[in-house]
Amino acid sequence: MLDKPALEKEFNLKAIRSSGSGGQHVNKVATKVELSFSINDSVVLTSDQKERIISKLATRLTKDQVLLMQCGDTRSQLKNKGTIVKRVIAILQQALQVDPERKPTKIPRAVIRKRLKNKKHNSDIKASRKKPKIE
């Protein structure tokens, strides 16, 4: 479905300083990795795939249709690069999956009868709580 090596070439990776544990090491070394991927500028994706990704990942994209993600899980820049690339590819593959069309089904008669029977039962219980009318 996706040509992973060609897609990885379109990713823009940038190393930035990470927060968290590590003491002085954190202040010196850029281990956190930021990945940006412009969906509109992609050569690997077809126009249909681009539309599907833009519609499914609308909340994750910037106004320019760029997917931005960061990974600072480990203290190793190389491991963070591998992790973020895997995550983005998984997200894109999930967005490209076509959901099967739902076939509407009819509600069985027995289910309808049971629901109405329960409604009637609850109605009778509540009616029995009322004061009787004296004529």
Image: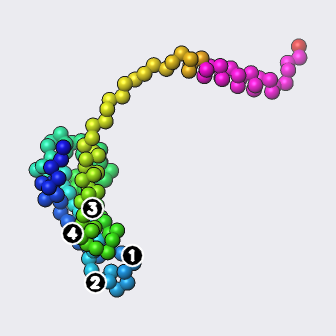
Q: Secondary structure at mark 3?
A: helix
Q: Which residue is mark 2?
A: 28
Scheme of colours in the image: rainbow
Tell me the residue at 88%/13% (across/down). 135
Q: Is residue 114 left or right of residue 78?
A: right
Answer with mark 1 or mark 3, whichever residue precedes in sequence: 1
Q: Is residue 100 above or below residue 8?
A: above
Q: Is residue 127 above or below residue 93?
A: above
User: What amino acid is labelled 3 in the image?
Assistant: Ile
Contact between labelled residues 4 and 2, with CB atoms less than 8 Å apart: no
Crowding at dot 2, Cα within 10 Å, few <14 / some 14-19 / many 20+, comes out as few
Q: Is residue 119 magenta?
A: yes
> Which span is picked out in magenta?
114-134
Tell me the residue at 25%/72% (across/down). 77
Q: Quadrant for residue 6, please give it.
A: bottom left
Q: Nearer the viewer, residue 122 or 101?
A: 101
Q: Which residue is mark 4?
A: 14
Can residue 15 be seen? yes
Q: Which residue is mark 3?
A: 84
Q: Secondary structure at mark 1?
A: loop
Q: CA distance from mark 2 to mark 3?
A: 22 Å
Q: CA distance from mark 1 to mark 2?
A: 13 Å
Q: CA distance from mark 2 to mark 4?
A: 16 Å
Answer with mark 1 or mark 2, whichever residue precedes in sequence: 1
Tell me the residue at 39%/75% (across/down). 20
Q: Closer to the observer: label 2 or label 3? A: 3
User: What amino acid is labelled 2 in the image?
Assistant: Lys
Q: Is residue 77 left or right of residue 21?
A: left
| Residue 52 x %, y % | 24, 42
Tell me the residue at 66%/23% (across/down). 118
